[in-house]
Image (spheres, helix red, strand yellow):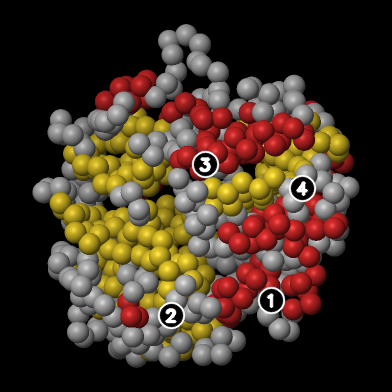
């Protein structure tokens, strides 16, 4: 269908079947395209009155925000641009949406991403870009740092910005019709503060940044009397604001490390420095996120980084709703994806490691729940892999968690001895989850097993685990990956003669480094938008505000130079024996494409593929398909066929 009609209350009958979710009898065989195509729907929201449903889609190759009036037969309002991506969007009122969009640009010859704000009036179906006449140099690059919407002023919001020095942001109150930054700020700049936080009522209450020499953190909180309190020392010890409630301007929800290194949720009194009470905790996980009501008055729920831990729901209505869907779908992890402000309607999401997101619309008055859509219709009930949580012991005794995905007819005890892909995540200070991953499922559909491991330095496992990865590029973090690979073979899961290491960003670095450090372990490696020269990476990042502070976990350009050089794959080409596939987006603004171009020149036997107009996350559908085809051809050539291949 060239024009996609979003009638979500019809349980997706037209859309799902037009996309080939399932035929009356046997489904069509799976293809690379089934996995590589972008999700049909994601980032769903409801308007405050529950009248409109919205979500991100890809239509005709373009990222599109689709807005549908639920009880109307009118065509959906579709918003797309051929040269910008929607970073975020949020409903500000019954018919008003504010979007932050990103565009490629350059500053003094350096390629950068610039952001802009766009207001969309759903009723009139008109858009306008804000601040179009503002030529302040400090405001050129980042224009979408919206902090809060003002409930008593529906057309107004708070934005963090600067006229002259983007390293010293102020906070301004702006409107939908703003063509320039206002003259006066509601919050002046403060030494060291780079990021401001405001609560749901529009009160600026937290500032985070670093000192001028980029050697120490700056963290300040405002008490109810308007005084700013310096809590930088606590921040360095792992203190982190999770949410700003509005029922008491002296209180914040914050994460505080316990004796086990994990961070439970506490109420903290800014005026007195007192930890008032522990709100939620787990002996095995950090807190990941906190949900407040739209006005900030009520704590609704708390999520944990460890998905094995059950979300704690404090609001009775939310809990009853969540319990209902848990009974309907006990095999998946379920939650509330969106809720109307008046709680008349909501969207529930259901997912697991082998089941893509499924969305359901419930209507409180009608007491009904209807299936809306799944993010991958052609994989509906057909995902080929089953995800298993695992742990193994690294060479120094540290326990490393991760996930093994096997063809769904196999279990860990089967010891299948199949070809395997080791798939380290990017970041590196991020983590993998037990969630549906299109790339993992595509590789498993070819009959390969996949290991995703959260090596030391990954988030969610406590401060000690996180800090164990500091300045360990190519060293202890890489050793964890090697130890995980050997563990696969020892467990009888992987065929030791058919192993490949595949990753993106930091994972791409780890793939190349794995081939260099362990030349006899892997039969191939794949780097997507990866780093090959750490010195070059740190240099490029240091050109931007806070760059030296942001790269402190990698290493100091001068003090740690010997280690940075020694652990850069560009300097270890002679040690690499296995075939290497290098793929990089032409317009990657996170890791410059010249990193891969240089590696390709130094290693001409590697296959190099450059994706036209490609970004760091291969967001363009054509590039995602091209990468997938190159990857699967490469794996087939070097890992061979598998008994469990589905295509």
Q: Nearer the viewer, mark 1 or mark 3?
A: 3
Query: In the rendered view, does 530 fall on the left or right side of 21?
Result: right
Residue visible at 69% across and 54% down in the picture? 600
Disc on the earlier residue, 1 or 3: 1
Query: In the rendered view, does 507 fall on the left or right side of 272?
Result: right
Residue 94's spot in the image, x, y percent?
16, 52
Residue 31's spot in the image, x, y percent?
55, 25
Residue occupied by mark 3: 624
Disc on the earlier residue, 3 or 4: 4
Residue 601 visible? The answer is yes
Question: Distance from label 1 to label 2 (Cα)?
Answer: 22 Å
User: Residue 555's mark?
Assistant: 1
- Residue nearest the observer in this picture, 174 or 333: 174
Disc on the earlier residue, 3 or 2: 2
Q: Nearer the viewer, mark 4 or mark 1?
A: 4
Residue 272 visible? The answer is no
Residue occupied by mark 2: 194
């Amino acid at each position: 269908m060239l024009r996609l009609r979003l009638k979500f209350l019809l349980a997706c009958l037209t859309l799902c079947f037009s996309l080939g979710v399932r035929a009356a009898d046997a489904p069509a065989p799976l293809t690379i395209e089934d996995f590589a195509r972008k999700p049909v729907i994601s980032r769903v929201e409801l308007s405050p009155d529950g009248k409109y449903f919205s979500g991100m889609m890809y239509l005709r190759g373009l990222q599109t925000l689709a807005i549908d009036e639920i009880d109307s037969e009118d065509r959906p309002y579709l918003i797309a641009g051929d040269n910008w991506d929607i970073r975020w969007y949020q409903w500000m009122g019954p018919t008003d949406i504010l979007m932050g969009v990103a565009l490629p640009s350059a500053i003094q010859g350096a390629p950068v991403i610039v952001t802009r704000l766009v207001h969309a009036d759903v009723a009139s179906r008109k858009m306008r870009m804000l601040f179009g006449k503002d030529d302040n140099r400090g405001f050129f690059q980042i224009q979408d740092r919206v902090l809060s919407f003002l409930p008593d002023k529906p057309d107004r919001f708070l934005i963090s910005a600067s006229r002259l020095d983007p390293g010293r942001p102020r906070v301004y109150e702006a409107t939908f019709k703003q063509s320039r930054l206002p003259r006066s700020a509601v919050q002046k700049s403060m030494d060291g503060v780079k990021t401001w936080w405001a609560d749901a009522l529009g009160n600026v209450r937290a500032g985070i940044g670093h000192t001028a020499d980029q050697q120490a953190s700056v963290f300040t909180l405002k008490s109810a009397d308007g005084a700013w309190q310096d809590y930088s020392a606590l921040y360095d010890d792992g203190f982190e604001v999770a949410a700003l409630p509005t029922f008491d301007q002296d209180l914040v929800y914050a994460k505080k490390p316990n004796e086990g290194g994990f961070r439970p949720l506490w109420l903290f009194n800014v005026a007195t420095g007192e930890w008032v009470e522990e709100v939620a905790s787990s002996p095995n996980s950090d807190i990941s996120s906190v949900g407040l009501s739209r006005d900030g008055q009520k704590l609704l729920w708390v999520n944990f980084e460890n998905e094995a831990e059950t979300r704690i729901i404090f609001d009775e209505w939310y809990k009853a709703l969540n319990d209902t869907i848990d009974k309907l779908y006990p095999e998946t992890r379920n939650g509330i994806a969106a809720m109307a402000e008046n709680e008349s309607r909501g969207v529930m999401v259901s997912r697991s490691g082998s089941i893509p997101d499924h969305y359901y619309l419930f209507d409180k008055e009608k007491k009904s729940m209807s299936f809306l859509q799944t993010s991958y219709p052609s994989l509906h009930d057909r995902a080929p892999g089953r995800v298993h949580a695992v742990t193994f012991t690294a060479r120094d005794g540290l326990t490393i968690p991760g996930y093994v995905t096997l063809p769904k007819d196999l279990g860990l005890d089967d010891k299948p001895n199949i070809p395997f892909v080791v798939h380290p995540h990017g970041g590196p200070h991020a983590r993998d989850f037990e969630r549906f991953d299109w790339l993992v499922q595509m590789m498993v559909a070819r009959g390969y097993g996949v290991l995703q491991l959260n090596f030391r330095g990954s988030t969610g496992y406590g401060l000690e685990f996180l800090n164990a990865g500091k300045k360990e590029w190519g060293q202890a973090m890489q050793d964890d990956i090697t130890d995980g690979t050997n563990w696969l073979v020892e467990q009888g899961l992987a065929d030791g003669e058919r192993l490949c290491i595949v990753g993106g960003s930091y994972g791409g670095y780890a793939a190349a480094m794995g081939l260099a450090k362990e030349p006899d372990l892997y039969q191939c490696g794949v780097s997507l938008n990866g780093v090959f020269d750490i010195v070059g990476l740190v240099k490029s990042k240091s050109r931007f505000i806070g760059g030296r502070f942001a790269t402190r976990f990698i290493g100091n350009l001068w003090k740690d130079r010997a280690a940075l050089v020694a652990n850069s794959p560009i300097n270890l080409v002679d040690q690499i024996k296995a075939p290497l596939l290098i793929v990089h987006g032409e317009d990657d603004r996170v890791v410059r494409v010249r990193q891969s171009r240089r590696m390709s020149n130094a290693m001409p036997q590697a296959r190099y593929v450059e994706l036209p107009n490609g970004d760091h996350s291969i967001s363009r559908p054509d590039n995602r398909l091209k990468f997938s085809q190159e990857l699967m051809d490469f794996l087939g050539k070097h890992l061979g066929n598998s008994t469990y291949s589905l295509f």
